[in-house]
Amino acid sequence: MSVSIIINPIAGGTGRAASVGARVDLARSVAAACKELADVHVTEESGHAAHLARAARAGGARLVVAWGGDGTVNEVASALAFGDVPIGIVPAGSGNGLASMLGMSFKPAVALATALRGTPHLIDAGELGGRLFVNLAGIGFDAHVAARFNAPENPRRGLAGYAALVAREALRYVPGHYTIDTTDSRRSLGAWLVVLANGTEFGNRIRIAPHARVDDGALDLVVVEQGSRLATLWGMRRIVTGTVEQAAQWSSTLVQRVKIESDTPMMFHVDGEPVQGGTTLDALVHPGALKICY
């Protein structure tokens, strides 16, 4: 049985022919060293990774490796969920939230060898607005930033470009008002962030849900409520410093299902990929829906 290695050529701000060629050569070299028969593919557009992963699954691959950022991981994981073929990850994006949480190496050769030799583990998948996610999904400021970061007119990629965008948009973002309905409560509030967390962090050790676990059969519903702009921005620094639980606006609840409503259509994201939704969004967890090798 073969493995399929799917490389996103623009992950992490690359895309130069030399860089892509080096990734392909490294993938083949590591696979050969691990005595694996590997099909190596380079994505050409959004959605291509999912198509390649579905084809690999149908063709009997024993493992599909996503070499890229959170969006590439999301596409591959969504194609493999609820099946027997596991995903492996070579983190190469701006965030790499799931890989960071799971302690995966950021050295491509090490990460790939680990995936090829790894034991499959079952983890949960979340769903928001009909779209699967494996790390984080959200409504509010993070979705707002994701939409602008992924826009064709955005010239700056990579972590530096993302950080600059966050800093700029934080000064002018207008928080939304939401009604959040869970099994145990119904709340109406203004919020900067409404996050459904399967993993703990956005990436780069920026933790929003420090107690989240990918295998507990639940999602952490994290809300950062609206305060004054100054108080909110001051409190948001705790996400970076690892003390987010001490922020007065932050709260977290374990949920299996939740409904979120707003008077206006909501932009949301799944693993950093922006999606335009309606005025009602349903979220739920799918326990043990995905196998992952690491």
Image (spheres, rainbow, N blue to C red):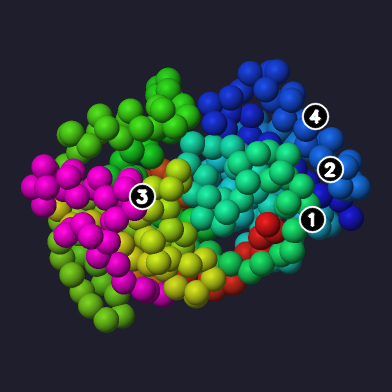
Q: Earlier in the sequence, mark 2 or mark 3?
A: 2
* Residue under the point 11% across and 52% down: 227
Mark 3, residue position: 268
How many other residues sit within 10 Å of disc 3, few (<14), some (14-19) or many (≥20)? many
Mark 2 or mark 3, which is nearer to you?
A: 2
- Please name which of the two marks, 4 or 1, marks the residue nearer to the observer: 1
Residue at label 1?
117
Q: Is residue 214 magenta?
A: no
Residue sitting at the far left: 228
Relative to 22, residue 134 above or below? below
Q: Secondary structure at mark 2?
A: helix
- Amino acid found under the numbered disc labelled 2: Ala
The x, y position of residue 159, in whole percent, is: 44, 32
Q: Earlier in the sequence, mark 3 or mark 1?
A: 1
Q: Residue drawn 31% across and 80% down?
A: 183
Q: Position of residue 197 (x, y in %)?
A: 41, 61
Residue 284 vs residue 67: left or right? left
Amino acid type, callout 4: Asp
| Residue underneath mark 4 | 25
Specify the segment rendered in magenta: 227-256
Report the quarter where the C terminus lies: bottom right
Residue under the image location 63 percent in, 34 percent down = 8
Mark closer to the chain start, 2 or 4: 4
Q: Secondary structure at mark 1?
A: helix
